[in-house]
Image (spheres, rainbow, N blue to C red):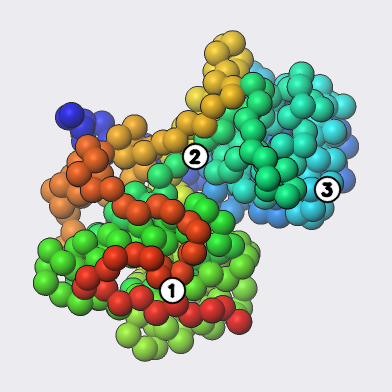
Amino acid sequence: MTVNFKKIRKTTALFGAALLTVMSFAGCKDKNSNAKDTPVDVVVVTDYGTVDDNSFNQAAWEGVKQYAEESGITCENYQPEGTATDSIIAQFKRGDSNKAKIFVCPGSMLEVPVYEAMDKYDGQCFILIDGAPHNEENTETRIAENVSVISFAEEQAGFLAGYAAVRDGYKGLGFVGGIPVDPIIRFGYGFVQGADYAAIEMGVNVHIRYTYTNTFSEDQAIEDLSGTWYEDDTEVIFACGGSITRSVIRAAENHNGKVIGVDVDESSESETVITSAMKDIKTAVYNDVKAYFEGTFPGGVDTNLTAKTNGICLPMETSRFVKFDQANYDYVYSHLADGMIVPYNKTDIGTCEELSLINTEVTFIPFE
């Protein structure tokens, strides 16, 4: 198989640039739960995150807004008052009252609400990103015909980030994950394996501190922990989980450290961000919304986007590497795309204990 890396680089650059700005398109409104309701075509329902997080939620929102601008449909963001299933389902009810045709649901917090809503609101469609609809007990998982599930090979994106960091000369790494849901664990596992792969090639030893913060929000405790790591031998931290990146960035700026962003190109957040492990969420959401209005909605399936489909990448044109270059990137990306490198991606344990590492030591640190 031949991978068109020129196309990858062009797509990466355009995608990264588009994510740097929050666009305000006619017909789309970011509404909180107390706003006055009006008829709407597409609703983005977030969990406790916001659509200006320069991360996961924002990428989904911008995909919707791009299609809305092009087609003239209306879209709004509904943010529940909490993460409880009833609070989220109330937003589906609200959208139904406002004649919404499709709900875009970013994140695993929406898994149970979508499961409970997909049959009740079978006249609407749902796009669930990074999750699978399941019941509260997690004993049944089902994707109804009015649900499109979009998932990504986070282990591949994480692998690219870890490989690039070590190839760029870093030997003291850190992984600060958010809530340990499957995508976050896969990002971390890929990061560790990519670092080890590069360490073996280079004949060096790498140490990685590893933790989950159990939140996707900024937190002083995250900044403090990251600062402690930077003061020791950690040189670069992969901040993996919504707005926690901002906490890690503040620590990096105060301790001469470096940061790897996640989901979208976060290079504009700080000079300390050397790269980002990206998922093309914006394009995936745009394509599904477009398919709905064109009568080709991919309901009932889970579409997994990988290196082979250009669904993941590093934004090389905005990355701040010193030694790792495009040739290095093309080499490792091609091996992921053609299956020569297949990172372990199971998430049962989550603490790296089951990974077969050779030149890398991982110290798992419970977050307190």
Q: Residues within 10 Å of mark 1 (few under 14, many from 20)?
A: many
Where is residue 282 drawn, in percent x and y? 50, 36
User: How many callouts does the rendering have?
Assistant: 3
Quadrant containing the N terminus is top left
Which is nearer the N-term, disc 2 or disc 3?
3
Residue placed at 20% from the left, 77% from the top?
Answer: 205
Residue placed at 42% from the left, 62% from the top?
Answer: 188
Query: Could you tell me if the residues under marks 1 and 2 are in contact, i.e. CB atoms within 8 Å?
Result: no
Q: Is residue 191 left or right of residue 120?
A: left
* SS for callout 2: strand
* Alpha carbons under labels 1 and 2: distance apart: 24 Å
Could you say which disc has been placed on residue 87 in the image? 3
Q: Amino acid at mark 1?
A: Tyr
Q: Is residue 23 left or right of residue 86?
A: left
Where is residue 263 drawn, in percent x and y? 46, 50
Q: Amino acid at mark 2?
A: Ser
What residue sits right under mark 1 in the picture? 210
Q: Is residue 229 left or right of residue 66?
A: left
Could you say which disc has been placed on residue 151 in the image? 2
Residue placed at 11% from the left, 72% from the top?
Answer: 203
Residue placed at 58% from the left, 28% from the top?
Answer: 148
Q: Amino acid at mark 3?
A: Ser
* Vertical placement of residue 179 versus 292, above or below: below
Which is nearer the N-term, disc 1 or disc 2?
2
Which is nearer the N-term, disc 1 or disc 3?
3
Q: Residue furthest top?
A: 295
* Vertical placement of residue 85 versus 67, above or below: below
* Alpha carbons under labels 2 and 3: distance apart: 24 Å
Q: Residues within 10 Å of mark 2 (few under 14, many from 20)?
A: many
Q: Residues within 10 Å of mark 3 (few under 14, many from 20)?
A: some
Query: Could you tell me if the residues under marks 2 and 3 are in contact, i.e. CB atoms within 8 Å?
Result: no
